[in-house]
Amino acid sequence: MAAIFFRILLLCLFLCKIKCFSNTEECFASKGLLVINPNFDAYNFTRSQLYTTGTIYQPQGVIIVRSVHDVYNTIECAKETEAHITVRSGGHSYESYSHGSNKSWIIDFVNYNKINVNEKQQTVTINSGVKVRELNDFLAERGFFLPTGTCNSVGIAGLSLGGGVGITSPEYGLTQDYILAIQIVMSDGNVLDVSKHQHPDLFWALRGAGGGNFGVVTKITFKILHPPKCTIGIKKLYENMFAHDLFHIWQTYFTSEDADRSISAFITVNDPGNGKTVLDVTIATKSEKECMLSLEKVLQLFPGINQNEITYFQSYNEAHTSKAEDYELPAGSAPSCQITINFLVEKPLTYEESKKAIELLLNAGNDFSMFAGRHGGRINDVHPRETAFVHRDAEYLITLYSVKDCSVNAQATLQRLFEEYDFMDNRLSYQNLISKLQLNYLQRYYGENLPRLIHIKRSYDPDNFFCFPQSIPAGFDEKENYCPFDQ
């Protein structure tokens, strides 16, 4: 009888090892994880969203991971207790998907931010908590740089896994184009080192579709470069009545084969800060002579630029920091109202089409703005199927947005406005500017690469453990793609 009782006890202990915790937080505690729950004073800061379209999420808690083992333990507990987890590197998801939902636990990399450089091999390895500003400053001190996005507080991991467009992209390409290797923790707990030689299919998928779809990326190694020797910035404001002429000049030049790759130029129509049209130009070259030649082209293209609107920077990093200041939100600040929708453009427009593009925006009302950013150049030297980032034929990106009104009516207006740009839309959208307003979003984000991505998802995450409202599905069956994300 005692022997039978002992066997039953062993069986119970075995089953308990598989699943014995009454709740997720109890499991986290047993693993020694640092968890910030709603009972902590720091909770409101650690769970704070940068953006909101009207919903303020109250996640179950935030796990401040300090090692790959912490990530492994978090995943193990979440699977044992059937909890939903989401991952936050910088927290800049436009739909706050990196902040989870009311049912989610957030894996936060804020304290997992080491940087290691190999100057001889010209590589840098970063943990997933490293931000753009941290990496830029670190590399600049050592005479290197990596093409990144514009906003300093964005996480390098999230930026690069979705592409990584910035002010030097036409000349140097995307941040993701410099990825050499990735470390990732899978839903089964395996820690994989991924590169073109190891798990090449997953390496292909992570470069362009890696944000929250396949596993938790903990470390990335990049090839690094020597920075541009000369950097010039130009910022000029125009009245909106001149926006169509300015936009037509801009899009005509940057869709031409003669477009200078060292010139990156953005146009914001009806800028929410000043109600004007803003031209923002960055010139970054390998010599001062090239800089002056590119500057002359800009001055010929765009009328009325004065010397006091031109800045000659001492270094590329100074230029990047200066540009980034226009895009920053203070840490811990109240969520910013923001609704967006975007599309890419491949073809040059006629003057009438350029005029129509601006009039559509201005007629929508003062609450709406349009951002036009150069794409193309070095980005398009890579084939659309070489990585999961399919946007290799577009010449520029259009983002329609409001930071003044995020109401249901404003969202409906923005969607209708988006549909009216059908005449220039190439039917694709940039996934790093994720939007719940984007219909047919998977096809728009990944285009012809979507079927292969679904196949890879099914191979590496068949249970759809890593999911959010716009994640890549593990198949086409509704049961296969169940996601506990609470919207």
Image: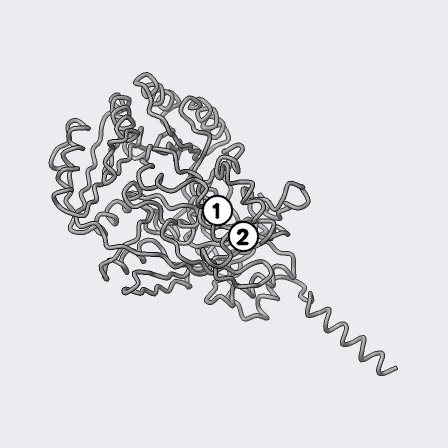
Residue depicted at x 43% and y 60%: 219
Q: Is residue 56 left or right of residue 267?
A: right
Badge 1 density bin: few <14, some 14–19, many ≥20, Cα 10 Å? many
Residue 200 percent coordinates (x, y): 49, 54
Q: Amino acid at mark 2?
A: Phe
* Placement of 196 over or under 164, stated as above or below: below
Q: Secondary structure at mark 1?
A: helix
According to the picture, the residue beneath numbered tag 1 turns out to be: 209
Quarter of the image with the C terminus is top right
Q: Amino acid at mark 1?
A: Ala
| Residue that extends furthest to the top in the rendered view of this protein | 352
| Residue that extends furthest to the bottom in the rendered view of this protein | 2
* Placement of 369 over or under 62, stated as above or below: above
Residue 470 percent coordinates (x, y): 54, 42
Mark 2 vs 1: CB contact within 8 A: yes
Instruction: Compare residues 462 and 322 and report the one nearer the observer.
Output: 462
Instruction: Compare residues 158 and 13 and report the one nearer the observer.
Output: 158
Q: Quadrant of residue 271?
A: top left
How far apart marks 2 and 1 lie (CA) works out to 9 Å
Mark carried by residue 487: none
Badge 2 density bin: few <14, some 14–19, many ≥20, Cα 10 Å? many
Residue depicted at x 53% and y 32%: 439
* Placement of 400 over or under 129, stated as above or below: above
According to the picture, the residue beneath numbered tag 2 turns out to be: 214
Residue 437 percent coordinates (x, y): 50, 33
* Placement of 89 over or under 357, stated as above or below: below
Mark positioned earlier in the residue sequence (2 or 1): 1
Q: Quadrant of residue 402?
A: top left
Residue depicted at x 37% and y 46%: 164
Quarter of the image with the N terminus is bottom right
Residue 477 percent coordinates (x, y): 67, 41
